[in-house]
Amino acid sequence: MENTVRLRDVETADLEAFLAYEHDPEAVRRSRFPPREREAFMAHWTSKVLGDPANLVQTVVVDGGTAGNIVAWWEGERRYIGYWLGRPYWGRGIGTRALTAFLELETARPLYADPAAGNAGSVRLLERCGFVATGTVLHGENEHVVLVLGGGA
């Protein structure tokens, strides 16, 4: 059965689901991203993510449930995207459909992403949506793949 995937603006209640997904041990292992404690997570989302009008922030909704989020932000002169889906939504084509819809809203190009090198599912998702690997970068001790949509270096 095809799941209905849609995007909408983030609601305060979504943050609890986002926090839980960030603390999933397998998601932490794949992303190489250490989960934040609740207070730090909420402060980050309130001030830096939702509080920055230059960001495009959407909740991924699947059959009415909060599946995760997709965010675009500026880092210097580069526009980046990142996303986080809860484990129940992995491997079902939901990420591809959500990111495809997000890329219709986020029109800045080039657009960058840098998932952990060992996160093959995330790298494949980006490549399916037209991103091209251009190299790697270290975040701390972790290697990440730099992918670009729409040219750039």
Image (spheres, helix red, strand yellow):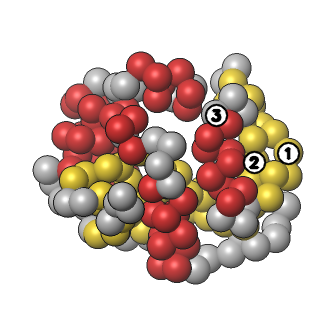
Counting from the top left corner in percent of width and height, residue 137 is at: 77, 37
- Quadrant for the C terminus, please: bottom right
Label 2: which secondary element: strand
Q: Residues within 10 Å of mark 2 (few under 14, many from 20)?
A: many
Q: Nearer the viewer, residue 30 or 64?
A: 64
Q: Which is more N-terminal, label 1 or label 3? A: 3
- Crowding around mark 3 (Cα neighbors within 10 Å: few <14, some 14 to 19, many 20+) is some
Q: Position of residue 139 (x, y in %)?
A: 67, 31
Q: Residue at image x 51%, y 43%? A: 91
* Quarter occupied by residue 111: bottom right
CB atoms at circles 2 and 1 under 8 Å apart?
yes
Residue beneath label 3, please?
119
Tags 3 and 2 in contact by the CB under 8 Å rule? no
Q: Which mark is residue 90?
A: none
- Secondary structure beneath disc 3? loop
Tag 3: amino acid: Asn
**Three-letter amino acid code at disc 1?**
Gly
- Residue extending furthest toward the front: 1
The residue depicted at 56 percent of the width and 27 percent of the height is 30
Of the two numbered discs 3 and 2 on the same chain, state the one appearing first in sequence.
Answer: 3
The amino acid sitting under disc 2 is Val
Determine which residue is flagged by label 1. Answer: 135
For label 2, the residue is: 146
Q: Nearer the viewer, mark 3 or mark 2?
A: 3
Mark 3–mark 1 Cα distance, whole angstroms, equals 15 Å
Q: Give the residue at x 36% y 58%.
A: 1
